[in-house]
Each structure stands twice: as structure tokens, then as C-alpha cells.
């Protein structure tokens, strides 16, 4: 589903990703851990098409398409979803409006008619319940004045409604208290199926107790320096990253 | 000289203006003509007109038109159903188009012409109370040229049963529509008035002046919806005298015209409240100019001012907001805010908040921002599947909609939303 080969990325001529290779198959959950500034968010932004990044080498194939050729909105409509590390506040645009506009953009891309207003409300309300959010959040401006944890939960709400094929979670667990972590993880787990893949960026092994990954990678200095099973996360928790730096995968 | 052609033209049309038999009005007009005659239309050298180029008024001689022809289907799209209305066609009251049947007995609404016949003495003591020719030469022009208008009076403790819409309609190319409106709310009276400016032709000149006299504890909500045609020249001034404890809420939606200038001035007596909201949206080569002045003359007054501007292409916007707190006006509480969104590198806004404070125990603040859409917000929406144009439109719409949201009249709000969505088509709301 996703195949990243030897990806090199610069920001303002400064190399950030330096030959990153990663393959994700349908239905797999991959976790990426790594020190601050390693390039984890950069990877998530490049995958979702944010401007300001230059790919100097390498390729990203997504379901047989050259992902890097696609405009950000086309990637989204093709099923790439990024839950932002720092979700953006959009004053004046209500959550429910954005959800509907986004869902209809996806449906249009798939040749489907706009969602029926009643059906839409039913879907949205069931997902709000799943994430144990207050329905009032639907009518508030997107992320405006939300606490850190509420913003993260709101990102997962969007994912639950848009049903992406590739779900990139950039530190969705950061800033969540233990109850919220459990609820959000349950939300994510309910989205897991044989086709949907996840790329989860996290600093904390705790998340992986709730959402069991198939593969754990360590990203350091712009490259994957080690990959392994869930036990790698436990090892990292114990030993930190320093023993891995300078290694290649 | 600027305005010379108008002065020459005046001698011919003076006989057609109302109030020929009223010496006081003749004197009023003569004095205004003299003031106007000194320098004509205001020029860029005057500080208050630095950014405003009125040269189009000298290139074309805009002249009054007696035509009362209106395409009613076209007009109806701007009408509010749940409101009384006065329709001024090319500056003249139209009895057949106006709807004044629902007024209560102690509220009177009539054309200015009618009022000059019915109660000239009452008018004599009120016309020119809130503004004089000395203000600037467009007021002087209006004083000399006004041909008709609306006079509204609510007796003490009375309330207008329904909002009153004043539709300023121009249907003749190069017409001059010079109207004068007077709103008198006696003690504790309340009214909601909606001024709507539209034109079915491209080029014309609107010069309109409102004087509002609010008695103690009276309340006036006045909306201005300026949707003039693309090449129209628009001047609309609203001058208010607020009595003790009175409330004046103004909403200025400036969305149309080639060049538009609004003046909104209010003088506040003790504990009066004044709220001025504004939204100006301009594109192409439009110029929209807003001048507000809040004079806190007595203690305990409250003023809140919030203006937003959205400027695209080569459009230009001006916000000059002045708050004056007189020495006597202790305990004044005043806030002024102007936020602007520039959608193109060639768009421009000149924003000039001015506080003049002569009292020492006051709470006054002001803030100004000029910015562009945030790229991270555009990307966020794109990452949710919206294309870039839709993302920008939605964000712009949201910025502007904050002002529409403050409109309490649901029908008017819907009309404004429609106008905004035409300019920034977002996916259906
Ligand atoms: N606009 C920018 N200009 C210059 N350097 C940048 C810019 N954005 C990011 N960087 C740098 O790129 C590097 C990788 O940043 P990135 O945000 O991808 O790290 P990260 O692995 O997500 O870190 P964290 O765990 O703290 O979230 C950092 O050194 C960062 O300072
Ligand atoms: Mg990061």
C-alpha cells in the first residue's frame, strides 16, 4: 500500500530525511519512534503534501500511484489521512461544517452523491459517541480553544468519519491523560481492519500497549535505523535511543 | 474648480427641490451652496480625504432623475418580507413601492417631502442638528441638493412594530440620488432600521445623509447594507446625537460600488452606549472608505467598535476610526478593533485608529491587524480533501462571517450570507 524508497528531503536546503525506506502492507500497523528532531513529523508532512519540503531523491508509491505527484487534497481523497501533531485552529468554521465538506469531497472523488443530511448526522453522532466526546464540540469552531487532548481526540473523530486507507497519527497520544488515551486508542482500534494501514508516530510505549503494532521502527537522523516487533518498543523504553544512533537498519 | 458643473446645474434644478416656500430651508440650502462653492468636492489634500479620490464626480455630471421605473422582481431580491419599507427610487419616495401599513399610531414614517408640507416647524428645529455643512463638502452638497428622503419619528416609549427597511434604489444611468433621512426617537423609544443601497444600472452617484436624534434611554439599531453597482460612487453619512442612557447599534456592510465612503459619527451623552460594527469587502479596483467618530462627551459612556476588511485584487480599503473622550467624559469605556485580510499582493488597506483622550479616568483600547490567510490553515483544510480554492474561500468566508453573525435580524442575515457566499463560494453550508 505504501512504499517509501530512499527518501531524501530538505527544508530550505537543510537535509532532514536522509534515505528513508519503509514499506507498509494493507492492514498493518507500523509505529515510528525516535528522538526529537529526527524527522518524524517531516515524514508525515511530506506524505500528506505540505509545501516547504523538497524531495531531492527517492520515491513514495501509494496504491500504485506516485504519491509525491498528487496535490494534498487528492492524497486526502485517495485515503491518506494525517492526524496532526499540532492540529490547527480554524476560527469561524464549525467542526460539523468541515466534517461534511471533507466527507463530500471524498465522496465526489469516488463518484458518489453528497451525503444525505440525516445519514450524515447519524454517522457523526455515532462517532462522537465512540470517542466519548460532547456533541457540543461539533458546533464549535475547528479546534478553537480546544485543550491539547481535545484537539487530538477531534483529529481521530475526523479519521473515524472519513475512513481513510492510510492513517498517519503524529503523536496523537502526546498530551492525553490515561483515560483519554484509552478512549482514543479504542477509537483507533475500532478503525483497524484488513485493508486500513496505520503509521503511528509516538514517543511512548504506553500507546503501543493499547494499539498493538505489527512493526516498530526507530527513526534517527533522517533514516530508519532499526526495525523490529513490538518488543523493540519495550527495549527503547528501557535503553533510550543513544545505542542506536549512527546505526543503519 | 471641482464641482463647478454641479453649481451651474443647480440653478436649473433648484425649483424642483422641495421646500421652496420655506424661507428657513432656502437659507439652509443657500448657506450649504456657499460652503460647497468655495472648494467643491473634498480633495486629497484634506487629511480626512487623503485616500479617497472623488475625481469621478467631476468627470461625469450626475443629475437628478424623475424616473420611477423599477424592475420589481429585481428589487424584491433585496426586500425583507418581515419589515415595513420605504422605497426611494432615484432619490424620490415611491408611495406605490413602499409598505407602511403596519405602523402603530404613535410612530410616524413619511417622505421628507411630505413632512416638509405637514410639519415644517418641527423639521426646522431638527434638520442640521446632528451635522452641518461645516463637516465636509459632501454634507454641504447633500444639504443643498437633497430631493427627498424619509422622516421617522417614534413617540416616547413607542417601539416600531417591525423593522423598517429603507431601500435606496437607482435605476437610471448617471443619476444623482441625494437623500436626507431623519430618525427621531423620543425618550425610551426603540427602532430597527435597515438601509439598503442597490442599483440596477452601473454608473450613478448616491449622496445620502442620515441624522439620528436619540432621546434619553432610546435605542436604535441601524443596519447599512451597501450593495451599490460596480461603477457607482457612494457617499453615505450617518450622524447621531445620543441622549442619556441611549443605545445606538450600527452595522455597516460595505460590499458594493466603485468608490464608497461611509461616515458614522455619534455624540454620546452620559452613560450612552454606542456599538459600531463593520465589514468591507472589496475586489477588482473598488475603493471602500470608512470613517467613524465616537465622541464621548459625558461620563460613563461605553463604545465598542469592530471593523473587518477583506481586500482582493487591486482593491483599496480605508478605516479611520476616531474616538474622542472629552475632559468631562470620566469613566468612559471604549474599545476599537480593526482587522484586515489581504487576499492579493496588490490589495491595500490604510487603517488609522485614533484615540484622543482628555479625561484621566478612562478605559480605552484599540487594536489593528493586517494579514493574509494562514498557509497552515489552508493546508489543514486541503489535508481534509478540500481543494485549495475552496479552502481559501472557506477561510475568507469565515473571517467575514464573524460580522454577519452579529446580525440579529434573521432575514437580513440570510441576505448577507447569500451576498458573501457569492463572493467566496464555499461548499454549501
Ligand atoms: N521550517 C523549518 N526550517 C528549518 N528546519 C526545520 C523546519 N521545520 C523543521 N525543521 C527541522 O527539521 C528537523 C526535523 O523536525 P521534525 O519536526 O520532523 O522532528 P520530529 O522527529 O517530529 O521531532 P519531535 O519528536 O520533536 O516532534 C528538526 O531539526 C527541525 O528543527
Ligand atoms: Mg514531530
Image (spheres, helix red, strand yellow):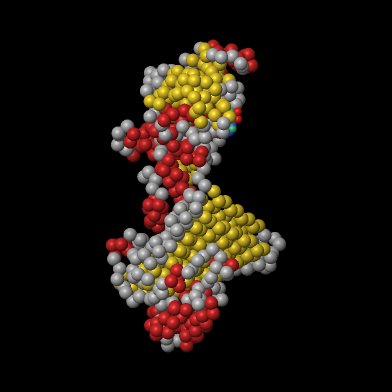
Horizontal side, residue A191 vs residue B47: left or right: left
Q: Nearer the viewer, residue B175 or B181?
A: B175
In the displayed structure, A96 sits above or below B43; it is above
Dividing the picture into quarters, in which one does residue A12 lie? top right
The outermost residue toward the right is: B360
- In percent of width and height, residue A135 lies at 45, 37
Which quarter of the figure is the C terminus of chain B placed in? top left
Residue located 66% across and 61% down the image: B331
Q: Nearer the viewer, residue A62 or B17?
A: A62
The residue depicted at 45 percent of the width and 73 percent of the height is B58
Residue B293 horizontal/vertical position (percent): 57, 65
Residue B223 horizontal side relative to residue B86, left or right:
right
* Residue B130 picture location, percent across and down: 54, 73
Residue at 62% over, 59% down:
B333
Which residue is more in the foreground, B418 or B116? B418
From the top left corner, tell me how far across and down residue B205 is, in percent. 42, 70
Amino acid at each position: 500500500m505504501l512504499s517509501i524508497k530512499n527518501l531524501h528531503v530538505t527544508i530550505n536546503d537543510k537535509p532532514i530525511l536522509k534515505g528513508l525506506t519503509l514499506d507498509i502492507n494493507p492492514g498493518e500497523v507500523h509505529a515510528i519512534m525516535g528522538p526529537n528532531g529526527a524527522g518524524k513529523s517531516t515524514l508525515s508532512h511530506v506524505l500528506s503534501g505540505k509545501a516547504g519540503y523538497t524531495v531531492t531523491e527517492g520515491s513514495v508509491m501509494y496504491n500504485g500511484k506516485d504519491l509525491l505527484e498528487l496535490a494534498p487534497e487528492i492524497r486526502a481523497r485517495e485515503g491518506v489521512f494525517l492526524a496532526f501533531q499540532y492540529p490547527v485552529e480554524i476560527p469561524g468554521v464549525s467542526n460539523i461544517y468541515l466534517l461534511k465538506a471533507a466527507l463530500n469531497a471524498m465522496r465526489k472523488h469516488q463518484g458518489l452523491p453528497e451525503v444525505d443530511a440525516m445519514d450524515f448526522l447519524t454517522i457523526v453522532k455515532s462517532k462522537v459517541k465512540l470517542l466519548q466526546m460532547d456533541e457540543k464540540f461539533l458546533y464549535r469552531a475547528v479546534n478553537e480553544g480546544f485543550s491539547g487532548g481535545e484537539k487530538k481526540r477531534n483529529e481521530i473523530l475526523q479519521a473515524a468519519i472519513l475512513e481513510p486507507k492510510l492513517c498517519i497519527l503524529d503523536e496523537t497520544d502526546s498530551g492525553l491523560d490515561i483515560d483519554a488515551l484509552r478512549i482514543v486508542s479504542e477509537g483507533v482500534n475500532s478503525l483497524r481492519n484488513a485493508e486500513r494501514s496505520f503509521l503511528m508516530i509516538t514517543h511512548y510505549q504506553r500507546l503501543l500497549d493499547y494499539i498493538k503494532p505489527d512493526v516498530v521502527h526507530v527513526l534517527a537522523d533522517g533514516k530508519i535505523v532499526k526495525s523490529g516487533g513490538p518488543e523493540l518498543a519495550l527495549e527503547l523504553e528501557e535503553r533510550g535511543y543513544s545505542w542506536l544512533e549512527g546505526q543503519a537498519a | 474648480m471641482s464641482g463647478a458643473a454641479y453649481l451651474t446645474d443647480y440653478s436649473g434644478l433648484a425649483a424642483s427641490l422641495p421646500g421652496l416656500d420655506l424661507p428657513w430651508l432656502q437659507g439652509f440650502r443657500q448657506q450649504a451652496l456657499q460652503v460647497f462653492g468655495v472648494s467643491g468636492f473634498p480633495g486629497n489634500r484634506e487629511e480626512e480625504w487623503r485616500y479617497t479620490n472623488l475625481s469621478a464626480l467631476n468627470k461625469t455630471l450626475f443629475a437628478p432623475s424623475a424616473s420611477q421605473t423599477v424592475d420589481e422582481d429585481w428589487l424584491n431580491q433585496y426586500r425583507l418580507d418581515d419589515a415595513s419599507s420605504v422605497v426611494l427610487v432615484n432619490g424620490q419616495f415611491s408611495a406605490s413601492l413602499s409598505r407602511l401599513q403596519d405602523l402603530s399610531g404613535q410612530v410616524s414614517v413619511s417622505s421628507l417631502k411630505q413632512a416638509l408640507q405637514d410639519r415644517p416647524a418641527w423639521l426646522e428645529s431638527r434638520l442640521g442638528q446632528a451635522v452641518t455643512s461645516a463637516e465636509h463638502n459632501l454634507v454641504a452638497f447633500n444639504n443643498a441638493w437633497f430631493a427627498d428622503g424619509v422622516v421617522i419619528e417614534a413617540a416616547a416609549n413607542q417601539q416600531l412594530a417591525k423593522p423598517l427597511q429603507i431601500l435606496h434604489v437607482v435605476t437610471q444611468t448617471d443619476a444623482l440620488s441625494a437623500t436626507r433621512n431623519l430618525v427621531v426617537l423620543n425618550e425610551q423609544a426603540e427602532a430597527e432600521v435597515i438601509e439598503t443601497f442597490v442599483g440596477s444600472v452601473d454608473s450613478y452617484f448616491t449622496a445620502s445623509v442620515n441624522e439620528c436624534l436619540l432621546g434619553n434611554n432610546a435605542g436604535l439599531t441601524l443596519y447599512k447594507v451597501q450593495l451599490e453597482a460596480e461603477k457607482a460612487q457612494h457617499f453615505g453619512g450617518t450622524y447621531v446625537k445620543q441622549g442619556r442612557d441611549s443605545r445606538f447599534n450600527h452595522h455597516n456592510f460595505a460590499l458594493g460600488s466603485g468608490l464608497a465612503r461611509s461616515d458614522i459619527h455619534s455624540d454620546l451623552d452620559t452613560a450612552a452606549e454606542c456599538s459600531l460594527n463593520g465589514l468591507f469587502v472589496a475586489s477588482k479596483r473598488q475603493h471602500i472608505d470608512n470613517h467613524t467618530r465616537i465622541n464621548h462627551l459625558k461620563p460613563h459612556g461605553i463604545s465598542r467598535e469592530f471593523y473587518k476588511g477583506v481586500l482582493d485584487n487591486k482593491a483599496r480599503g480605508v478605516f479611520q476610526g476616531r474616538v474622542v473622550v472629552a475632559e468631562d467624559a470620566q469613566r468612559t469605556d471604549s474599545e476599537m478593533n480593526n482587522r484586515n485580510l489581504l487576499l492579493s499582493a496588490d490589495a491595500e488597506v490604510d487603517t488609522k485608529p485614533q484615540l484622543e483622550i482628555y479625561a484621566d479616568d478612562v478605559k480605552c483600547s484599540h487594536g489593528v491587524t493586517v494579514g493574509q490567510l494562514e498557509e497552515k490553515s489552508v493546508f489543514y483544510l486541503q489535508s481534509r480533501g478540500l481543494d485549495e480554492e475552496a479552502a481559501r474561500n472557506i477561510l475568507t468566508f469565515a473571517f467575514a462571517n464573524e460580522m454577519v453573525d452579529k446580525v440579529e435580524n434573521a432575514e437580513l442575515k440570510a441576505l448577507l450570507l447569500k451576498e458573501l457566499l457569492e463572493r467566496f463560494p464555499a461548499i454549501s453550508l
